[in-house]
Every structure is written in C-alpha cells, then in structure tokens.
Amino acid sequence: MVAPARFLRHAQTLAARGSSTSRCAAASSTAATADAAAAPAATHVRQAGAMPVTRSFNSAATGLSALRAGGGGGGSRSCSSSSIFSTGGSSGTRGNWSSRASSTHAFKSAASYAGSSGQPYSSGSSSDDRSGSSSSSSGRDTPKAQGFRMPGEWEPHAGTWMAFPHDPHLWRAAARPAQQQLAAVARAVAQFEQVWMLVDPKVRAEARAAFRGVSGVELVEARTNDVWTRDWGPTCLVRDVPVGSSSGGGGSSSGGGRRRREVGALHFDYNCYGSPLKEHPLMPDWSLDRAAGRALPARHPDVVRREHVWRAPPGLHLEGGAVLSDGEGTLLVTEECLLHPSRALPPPAWRRRHPHPLDSLALGRPADAPAAAAVAAVAAAVAAAEATSGGGGGAPDEAGLGRRVERESRKAAVGEMLCEWLGADKVLWLPHGMAGDEEGTNGHVDNVAAFAAPGMVLLAWCDSPDQDPDQTRLAAENLAALADQTDARGRKLRVVPVPCPLPVLKVTREEAGGAAAVAAAAAAAGYGGRMAAGARLPASYINHYIVNGGVVVPLFGGEQRRSDDAALEVLTAVYGGGGGGGGGGGGGRRVVGVDSREVLLGGGNVHCITQQLPAAWG
C-alpha cells in the first residue's frame, strides 16, 4: 500500500531538511526467522572454555541476516553460513571484587546501618535523595547530567542483594520448596561474590538452616513482601571520575590518568507491576518491598553516597527487570511492558518540559513541520508493516493512525525519560516479552533478551510451531525488531539465539494442588494471579545472572533436560571466551546451572531474584 500523499509530501520536504523526531532513538526493523537445532549433552556445572563448543542454527527461508556478527577471523562459531560469534575480545577475567563474609550468619538489623532506625532514608525527606518531582526533573540534576550511567551487568560487582521467600499466599507448601531452590541460587552466586540475603523475621530460623556453613552469604534482617530484588531494589548507576576531581564533570587532575568509580542508585516508582491499575492486583500490599528497596543504598554507605541517590519522576512505574543496559549508552526494553497501561506514563510536567513533535497532534493541536515529519514516519511504518504482512491497499485508517501517533508519542517520551535517568543515548524496543508472562510482569525484557557484551544481544529463540506456536511467533517478531539495528555507538548488533526450553513448561497438578489449600485464603486476602494446573510458565534461559567471573543459569530438568544442555552449551560459548564468544565483558567466565523451577512457579527466575551492587574504587 502507499501512504497518503499529504504524509509523503511532509516526509519529503522535512527529510530534505534533515529533521529529527526524537532525541533518544528508538528501534524498528524487518522480519527474519531461525531454527534452533538439537545440541549434544552438556553438564549442568561447566567451566567456561573447557571444551570447544559448536552450535549451529539452520537457515529459514528468509535467511539469517539478523544473526550475522561483525568481523573476526578463524575459530568463530557458525550460524548456517553466517557467524554469530566474533573472535575478538579479551580472554581474561575481572576477578572477584567482593570481600567474603564469614559463615556465622549473625543477623544484622537495619538499625545497624546508616539511616539509623532502619527506615528507608529516602522516605519523604528531599535532603535524603533527589526526586523527579522536584527541580531535578528539569534535567540539571538527573543522573545523566551528573555523569552517571547504568553499567553493563558484567562490570565489577561489590556483591548481590537477594531476599528469602516466606509468604504462603505466594509460594506453595509454606514456601519451603522455593526457599531450598533460592538458597541454591544464592550459594551459586556466593562462589563468585558476596551475597546479602534479606530475611524476614518470620523465617529467621529457616534462613539460618539454609545457609549454615556457607561462606559468602550474609543474612540481613529486613521485612519484605516477596523476593524480586531485581524489580523493587534500586537500579545502580556508576560514573568514573578523574582522581583529584570533585565531580564527574572532568577537568584537570593530578592523578596521572587514574580514575575512581563512584556508585549511585535510582529508585523507580515501584507499584508491584502496575497493580493499582489492574483488575486483579498481584498482591494487596507491596509497601515492605518498596521500603526495603529504598533502604538498600543506606546499608552500603562506603559504596553509595547519599547525594548519589535519586527517585525517578512519579508516574514512571517500572521495575529493574524492565530495562537492560550495555553500559555504553544503549538500553533494551519491551513495548509490551513499558507501554502497558499500568506502567510507564510520563507525568504532564515532564511532557511540558520535554515536548515531542508528536505531542501537538496527540493533543489535537495544529501540526508544525516536526510534527508533520513525525506523522509521516508513523504513516510510512504503517504502510510498510501492512505491505509486508500482505495487507490491502489504501490509506491508513485515520483512527488507527491517531492511535499510532499517540503510541509513538508516548514511546518517545518514555525513551527520553529512560535515557535521562539511566545515562543513556538510545533505546532499542522489542515488541514482546516471553509467552506466558502477559499477566505477571507484562513482558519484562530480562526474560526474553540480555546484553552479553556491548553490541551483543542474546535472544530467547524458538522455531518450533508444532510444540510452541506462541513463542515461535513472538521470537520471530522480536528478531525482526533487532534486524540491522545499531547501538548508541553505531555498532551493528550481533544477535545470538538462545533456545527456549521444550516442551513448554506448565504447572502440574501436584504443584497446583500444593497451593490449593491456601488459594481461597489468598484470593480473599487480595492476592491475584495464582497459577492453575496446566497454566503456561514463562521459562527462559535468558533469565540468567552475570557475576564476577561467572554466570548463573536457570535449569528445569525433567523433560527439559535436553533443552537445558543446549542452552548451557550456547551460554558457555558466549561467556566462556574459549572460542572468542566475547560475552560478559571479555569472556573467561564459569557457567553454573541451578535448578530453579520452584522460583519459576512464583513468576520469575535467577535474574529476577538478584540485584547487583556495582563495585566502587579509587
């Protein structure tokens, strides 16, 4: 089909002027597909780089142009005729940056940390942190303006925050199976770096028993609702300052080129996955999680200074698992989550201070030249999408175009806010999260994609329409969104497909029965989203966690053991560096698999229950 002439005239005129429609770029692309072949068996705990790994993917009819890697010499991994791994990058590890705790597990109360009474020091006082509702939202005092950025997960950690499960309304069998598997994840992480485990007083004895004799796990008493520290914990930021400088603004330094790293923290307006705006909230109360998350920076005054703690603008409702960073200016998110009605909604004050060309049309105002260019871009996208899908000819429906204008306006505003508050320059948008995650997180990006290194994206992949038609479709559309994309530094993305577990994981009768005794009480108490027998679980190997010198990967066992082995093989090739995978900031990491089905029954996995505190130095 052809876009209306009036839109094309605007587009041609303004293209000649070189007009731009956004200060923080968003991603769009065309379709491609791929087929994940079966892989040889792999062990569940593997030393990265211990053996050569070959992982091939058959080419579908449309080819695998989106999976090509940049340059590289011999020894690269194959993806049909195109390589998905380059041979560049360092093979060294960054080492363990954390100090290990003793195994005595004496509890520390919140009162023993800075912030005295244990209340979140950011609760209510403008002197404690900077809120987006104050002058900071003008851009003069945002993290980006101060030189902070969201680092890549592979950058050195001081340690990891986790929380111990306890609520029987949320976890079956009085949370005991979940406690066992979460403890196994914590022990795996503690092989590489310090773990601070938040423990509700109600399960103090259970936590002590779970970690008796385990070094590297410190138990910290704190009241919580649930375990998802990735989502309600702070998103940490870093900046590198020349030694001798008082700020991140640069300037002369007597440090001879040496730099110190400072750590900041950003609190999003966490509201339990948009629960206030959902017909069936996931929990009746999440205030303990929100308070626990806001208190975490005060527990580490030697790493995070008070003046480096921010609260995002009110209304920017999202969670840590909803956004990923490559550490070099590029963010990755999903439209399904951040454009969901319950999520990120830029407040009017922000929209007034940061107008976008589409806003004038969305608000019914006359179109100026930038707005006309923006509408032309939207109309062209509609035309291209319908032509690709075989849609009929004719002009885009005016009502439909209006909805697209409003959607693109909101998308641009959200992208600009994320760039400002996370120190980034470009946002890449995937259309979908994982199948089965629609009612929980509404499609968190950390379950469907991951940055393995700057310029390298791991993507949850399925090409099995017989076994999993839903994820096959979503994966193809996500791959299409990344085709021919570049990051903030202009590098073409290397997309590495990571096979999804097959057959599809579903709640068993036994698992559903274990919750039946409390289901009625949970519903009466206001808990929603309980999984019934046969419900799909949003299982993904993408939901792994990069630690100092290692990677902790969820495994599912049983019928999925073959998929477990295939995923471990791909991730070992990426992060181990033995064949030039280059993931994890240079490779050389040990990949450790941990059974985590019980965590998955709660709606998340390894990445969701961990939140890193970056290391500071200098």
Image (cartoon, grey):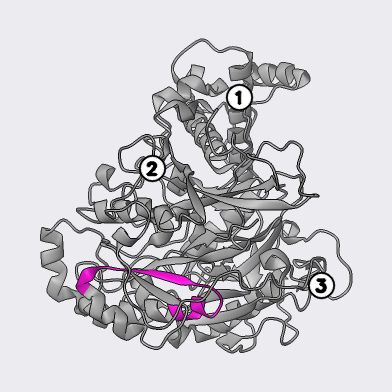
Vertical comparison of 136 with 584: above or below: above
Mark 2 secondary-structure assignment:
loop
Residue 244, picture quadrant: top right
Q: Contact (CB < 8 A) between labels 2 and 3?
A: no
Residue 345 placement (x, y as % from top left): 40, 35
Residue 163 placement (x, y as % from top left): 35, 67
* Residue under the point 40% across and 53% down: 298
Per the rendering, the mark at residue 327 is none
Q: Nearer the viewer, residue 464 or 506?
A: 506
Q: Contact (CB < 8 A) between labels 1 and 3?
A: no
Q: Is residue 561 left or right of residue 436?
A: right
**Of the two numbered discs 2 and 1 in the rendering, the one whose residue sits closer to the viewer:** 2
Residue 479, picture quadrant: bottom right
Mark 3 secondary-structure assignment:
loop
Q: Amino acid at mark 2?
A: His
Vertical comparison of 575 with 282: above or below: below
Q: Amino acid at mark 1?
A: Ala
Vertical comparison of 25 with 597: above or below: above
Mark 2 or mark 1: name the one nearer the start of the chain. 2
Question: According to the image, label 1 marks what residue?
Answer: 374
In the rendered image, residue 196 lying in the magenta stretch gets the answer yes
**Of the two numbered discs 1 and 3 in the rendering, the one whose residue sits closer to the viewer:** 3
Mark 2 or mark 3: name the one nearer the start of the chain. 3
Classed neighbour count for the residue bearing mark 2: other residues with Cα under 10 Å, few (<14), some (14–19), many (≥20): many
Question: According to the image, label 3 marks what residue?
Answer: 76
Residue 327 placement (x, y as % from top left): 64, 52
Q: Is residue 184 left or right of residue 148?
A: left
